[in-house]
Image: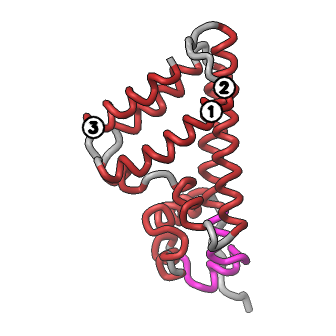
Amino acid sequence: MRGRPTIYEDSNIIKKAQQVFWQKGYSATSLSDLQKATGAGAGSFYNTFKGGKKEVFQKAVQERRLAFNAFQNELTKSESPLELIKDFFRSIAKADQNEHLKGCIIANTVVEMTFVDEDLESSAVHILKEVEQMFTEVIKTEQLKGTIKTQTSPEILGKYLITFWCGLNTLRRMYPDENVLKDQIEMQLAVIS
């Protein structure tokens, strides 16, 4: 006799779970929330994700890393990588209200998991540091080409863009208004002109 069927661990299931975590955070998300979002029963859920909620959350966070990796590929192929970075920030202003309220799951995780779960916090911090390094490398290259006037070190500017990113994800919750966000984004991007 067969046991309970397992759900298939595919990116669609992880993305469904990710939306719940994105809206509620890790701590407030229950097994029931995940089952409802993914359509899995408790047995199937645990047969597929032996590590339970934490495993699903880790995979949901890693899914975002894939998006950053795809962006990094675009940057390496672009003739204007700095403009791509600026356009990335500018696109935030055009997001819909729901996207504004969600913020960034990676930044949210750093804040939520500090003093709660060192593994989850460390994983999110590592991703943000990878993005910071990506920004730093682009800035360093653009400074060498002479397309950026500022002589502030690329490492400081890379950290600045991560600070801007994390702050922007709070600001967009406070002011989910395209015009307000556009003005703030342009003011911040002027630092890397």
Query: Which is more foreground, mark 2 or mark 3?
Result: 2
Give the quarter of the image for residue 160. top right
- Residue in the image at 57% along x and 40% along y: 162
> Does 54 lie within the magenta span?
yes
Q: Which residue is mark 1?
A: 158
Which residue occupies the extreme bottom position in the image? 1
Which percent across, then down, holds residue 99? Answer: 38, 50
What span is in magenta? 40-58
Horizontal arrangement in the rendering, residue 191 relative to residue 128 (left or right):
left
Mark 1 to mark 3 CA distance (whole Å): 24 Å
Q: Amino acid at mark 1?
A: Gly
Q: Do labels 2 and 1 touch, CB within 8 Å? A: yes
Which badge, 1 or 3, comes first in the chain's sequence?
A: 1
Q: Which residue is mark 2?
A: 154
Q: Which residue is mark 3?
A: 180
Which percent across, then down, holds residue 88? Answer: 48, 32
Q: Do labels 1 and 3 touch, CB within 8 Å? A: no
> Does 151 lie within the magenta span?
no
Q: Is residue 118 above or below residue 154?
A: below
